[in-house]
Every structure is written in C-alpha cells, then in structure tokens.
Image (spheres, rainbow, N blue to C red):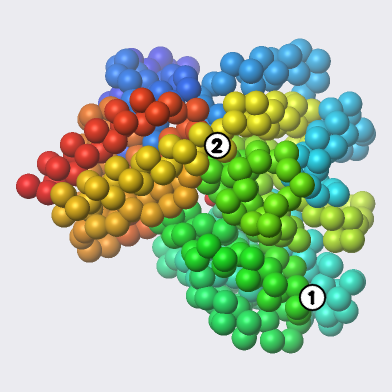
Amino acid sequence: METITSSKQAIALEEKYGAHNYHPLPVVLSKGEGVFLWDVEGKRYYDFLSAYSAVNQGHCHPRIKESMIEQLGSLTLTSRAFYNDVLGPFEKYITEYFGFEMVLPMNTGAEGVETALKLARKWGYERKGVAENQAKIIVAENNFHGRTTTIISFSNDANARKSFGPFTDGFIRIPYDDISALESALSQEGVVAFLVEPIQGEAGVYTPADDYIRKAKEACASKNVLLIADEIQTGVARTGSLLAVCGNCTCQGHCERQESYTKPDILILGKALSGGFYPVSAVLADKEIMEVIKPGQHGSTFGGNPLGVKVAMTALEVVRDEKLALNARKLGQIFRSRMTKAIQKYPIAKLVRGKGLLNAVVINDTSESSTAWDICVRLAENGLLAKPTHGNIIRFAPPLVITEEQLHECCDIIEGVLREFSK
Ligand SMILES: *Cc1c(COP(=O)(O)O)cnc(C)c1O
C-alpha cells in the first residue's frame, strides 16, 4: 500500500482510482477522538457532521472500541445459517431499549428501509387483505431514505434518479408536514404504510410541526395503515431525546412512554446504532407485524453478526450511561440561541432550525450559488468541519459528547466566518 504523507497525495489517488460518487471537502482525515478529527498534516478540527450522525458517541469511543476488540478475539461472523451467542442477547437488549417486541437486524440504513418496505407490503397482503401486487406506500416529498433502486424510485431528487430507471411502482408522494395531504392519500385503495422521517435531515434539517408525527400516526391508525419512522439519522439521541418520535420526553429510554411519545408501527435505525464502528441497522416492530416474515423471505449474510451486534449493544449503553440525549437537548438550545442572534447581525445567514444537536443554518443566497460550500471551506480552514446539504443549507451536527465550553468555541468560529461572508 502506498503510504500517505500529504492531503494532496491522498486526494489525487481517490480522484484517479475511486468512482466519483461523492464531492468531499478537500480535507484528508487520519485520526479521530471524541469531537475531534485530525488531517494527515496534523491539523485538528471540530467535527460538525459526525459522519451524517453515525458517530453520536464521538470518534473511537474507548468503551465501544474495547467491546469490539473483545468480540474480535472470539467470533466475528457465522451467517444466520447457525445461531450465535451474541444475537439473542442483542435482540432482547434492543427491543427492551426501544419498547418493541421484535427486531430484524441488517447492516446499512438503506437495507433497513428496504426491510421495512417489504415487511409493510407483506403485512398489507396477509393481514390487511390488500389484493396481491396492489399495495401502496405513502412517502414525503424531499425525502431521503437511501440509494437503492427501490428507494430512489420514490425520491424527487432529480440528481439521485436521472438515468437510473426504470423504477419500482407502488408509492404515493405527498408534501411533508401536511396532514390533510396525508389524509387524502390514505383514502386511496391499497395503502399499507406511510414512510416518514420525523425531521428531514438530508433535505436540510426540515423540522415539521411539533404534533406532525402524532397526527400522522392517528390518521394512519384510523385507516389501519402502518406508520414507518425512518430514524436512521434522527434516532439514538441526536435530536435531544432517545428518538425524535419521543417528542419532548427526556427519559433516555427509561420511562414508561410519556404523553409526547408516538410509537411508530415500524422503527428503522442505523448510523449511530453502532457509534461509527461497524455498519449495523435494525428494523423494530411488534410481533403481529414482524411475524409475517418467514425463513427464506428476507436476510443478509452479515445481518446480525456477532461483531456488529456486540458493538451496537455497547454503543447503546454509552448513549444511556453518558446521558447523550440530555446533552444534545441542552446544547442544542444554546446553539440555536447563539445562531439566532448571529443571524440578526450577519445577513449572509437567514434562518436556523433543528432540534437537539441536529441543526441547520440556511444561507441567504440562491440554491445554485456556491456560498454554503465556500463557507464550509472557510470553516474548515478555521478548524471546524461541516458540509452543505441540499440548496444553500449547512447542517451542524457535532458528536453528542461535545461539552458546553467546546460548543461555545465552535459558535465563535461559525460566527466569525458568517461575519466575514457578510462584509
Ligand atoms: C443515511 C440515511 C439513510 C441511508 O443509510 P445508509 O446507511 O447510508 O444506507 C436512510 N435514511 C435516512 C433518514 C438517512 O439519514
């Protein structure tokens, strides 16, 4: 292997030998610890992307690392052709943790979404009595649920879809955060589920009305339609509660679900479920739904492997023991209040929105301009890594282990750059 001694060299290799399916900021990282990342030249950065919220627990968390090393010494993969001695304990742990009866483990987020779609369709045919091949699933405009052919079939992102057809049928797209649009879609024949993100992360941290998910669940329940919550990005403490569907409950998952909690029929988790160590996703549901899947009808060679599920259990323990949801809630309020003030002074930014430590600042420029990108390049020069999302929006999502002092330092950096761009 070629040894990397400079950022330029690493970027040249990726440019030449790797598919160009991403457009990274020109920073080459080689080390991470907690809220920090270091590039190959040794420059330190605050991480304000957290691998799209996969490292809520902070980079290379020592406890998760220990647990992974321990498991590496005994068993990594058996496939599901046999039982293994970690999967059962994991299944008990995660279902109790999130309050569901059963779980189906997969690896990536997109696989979790595919699993939920298959589960909902099969439930629709076998339990609801929908005519074969007629099942419909409602989705929201500007959704992001992953990159498989079926998932892009119901996306309205032209760049994600162009030249990848033909697409999978059976989806109805409605505006996000619009209960009456949902109600009218629910009256169509054959609807089995509504798939939704409680906050649309990739769309630019679009945060709906506080009661949107609760009302969506009520509307779905009245038509015997499943509510599928994609919490791959919002879940695992990111938005200041264990799940975004927990509303304002701060229990860290210990409570007898409080009033603000809306239980989805199917919950999809990924990303921070394993704290960034290993791809682990999970689909949770109660027995009545999960039992429609029989042997041979769904699976994955790596899904439920002992290494992944051991890591996931420890990653969830860390979330609870370190009270990451409470920290996200408290520091998120500080972040938004500082940014709200900054926006009044610096006209280059026009809006801050979000929940917990999933936030975005909307830049005051056209969606085609490169201003958000240029601001992110400047932030990186000043030691803070963030990335624009769709249009001119910058997402700010640090690891949830960030301290109040560190957050203030980061707000100073961001404000300094907004000031520069407002001149
Ligand atoms: C990241 C993400 C996915 C896809 O997860 P992958 O692991 O990248 O396949 C799906 N849904 C949401 C909301 C996401 O943020």
Three-letter code for the amino acid on which mark 2 is drawn: Leu
Q: Which residue is drawn at 57% across and 59% down?
A: 197
In the rendered structure, the answer to whether residue 316 lies left or right of residue 75 reads left
Category of crowding for the residue at label 1, using alpha-carbon neighbours closer than 10 angstroms: few (below 14), some (14–19), many (at least 20): some
User: Viewer-nearest of labels 1 and 2?
Assistant: 2
Q: Do the residues labelled 1 and 2 touch (CB within 8 Å)?
A: no
Q: Quadrant of residue 226?
A: bottom right
**Residue 326 shows which numbered tag?**
2
- Asked which secondary structure carries label 1, the reply is loop
Q: Where is residue 161 in the image (x, y as percent from the top left)?
A: 49, 65
Residue drawn at point x = 32 percent, y = 15 percent: 42
Answer with the quarter of the image where residue 317 lies.
top right
> Residue placed farthest to the left in the image?
423
Q: Where is residue 102 in the image (x, y as percent from the top left)?
A: 85, 48
Q: Is residue 265 above or below residue 103?
A: below
Q: Name the residue under label 1.
A: 224
Left or right, 277 with reference to 376: right
Q: Which amino acid does label 1 sit on?
A: Asn
